Amino acid sequence: MSFLNHFNSIEDTRSHINQKHNLLDIIFLTVVAIVSGAEGWKDIKQFGDSKLAWLRKFRAFENGIPVDDTIARIISSLEPEALLSCFIAWVNEVREKNNQSVIAFDGKTLRHSFDGYRKTAIHSVSAYAVDQGLVLAQCKSKSKKNEVATVLELIELLELEGNIVTADAMHCLKKTAKAVEKKGGDYALQVKDNQSKLNKEIKAYFHKERRDNAEFVKQCAYETIDHGHGRIEQRTYTQLPVTDWLEQRQGWAKLNSIIEVVRERTVGEETSKETAYYISSLPVEPEKAAKAIRKHWGIENSAHWVLDMTFKEDESRIRRGDAPENMATFRRFAMNLARLSPIKDSMKGKLKQAAWSDEVRESLIFG
């Protein structure tokens, strides 16, 4: 039961008189219940009552399953930073057995995590290994405005060597590039108006190169075309090496290339077109750069969407103490376990199978 061993370091902050139920028992119960589709404290309690004999195959549960309010109190008492450290340690162990990846950073708001006194819902930032489909870490941010500081904290915690970090324009900052470079990673960061001088200079450089070196620019381009649902999407990625002409290159760690992405969408008779620009530490390999940029949106489609639609995270009204943040970590833990399973089914289907079958649940939890 190696995954549970990573939680051994968590300190039980409850007084001795309140330790009727073993902390690791309750952590195990919570993770397994979420893997089986549980959404709240009542669900976890009911799952525990119905599957107590199965749970006792792995943990003692000497005093049975606590009431839902006790489960809530125990989970809310966990120190979020300690729980995150355990989660990251487990993920790093898993990643050693897999190939390296594009790591996408993005924020997400837990919309119903506010209470009558706190008007702002919890905003968290996740790091997502797109190729492996694994959430590597998630951490609460004080607000969306503080997301940059949270991403820098996660960069410091994660193993990034050989990986490509992607993030939206908010994180197109010299300190972000420097932090990634320091950890041995590469980056592809979108440039917008928060770097207005850089943005204008990149546009001007592409215009200049198309005028002076049209054939070279064509050689540095990679194109994709997607069809579906009455829509045609054509994307052209052009990646050029950084030269001395670009004065705004100064101060950016390991800045090797700039990338232009032209997206053209046709729906029926209507065609729309948009252009975005990126800076990157990657050498000029347009296909590789294109895949990194395209994969960034995997965190929205394969992580955030699944958390909301399958794990019902956006509907969760868990609000007690640190419980919203801790339950967010447990949901990501459960999602990773399900993703790692070789069972051929959707995420929702795997959770249903885990709820119905002790054998499937055991397979998801222990591999």
Image (cartoon, helix red, strand yellow):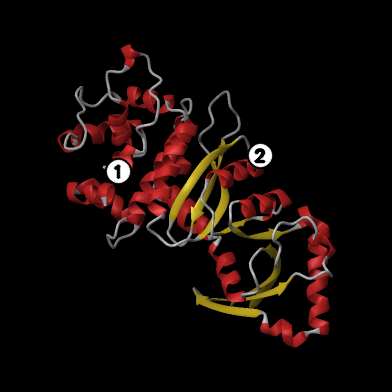
Q: Nearer the viewer, mark 2 or mark 1?
A: 1
Relative to residue 54, is residue 206 drawn left or right? right
Q: Position of residue 26 (x, y in %)?
A: 30, 30
**Could you say which quadrant of the image residue 256 lies in?**
bottom right
| Three-letter code, disc 1 | Ser
Q: Position of residue 262 (x, y in %)?
A: 68, 73
Label disc, if present, on residue 2 of the rendered structure: 1
- For the point 49% across and 73% down, the residue is 229
- Specify which label sits upstream in the sequence, 2 or 1: 1
Look at the picture and state if 113 lies above or below 1: above
The residue indicated by pointer 2 is: 146
Mark 2 residue element: helix
The answer to the question of whether label 2 and label 1 lie on touching residues, with beta carbons closer than 8 A, is no
Q: Position of residue 363 (x, y in %)?
A: 23, 51
- For the point 69% across and 84% down, the residue is 218
How far is disc 2 from disc 1 in space, using C-alphas? 35 Å
| Three-letter code, disc 2 | Asn
**Could you say which quadrant of the image residue 132 lies in?**
bottom left
Look at the picture and state if 342 lies above or below 105: below
User: Quarter of the image containing the N terminus?
Assistant: top left
Mark 1 residue element: helix
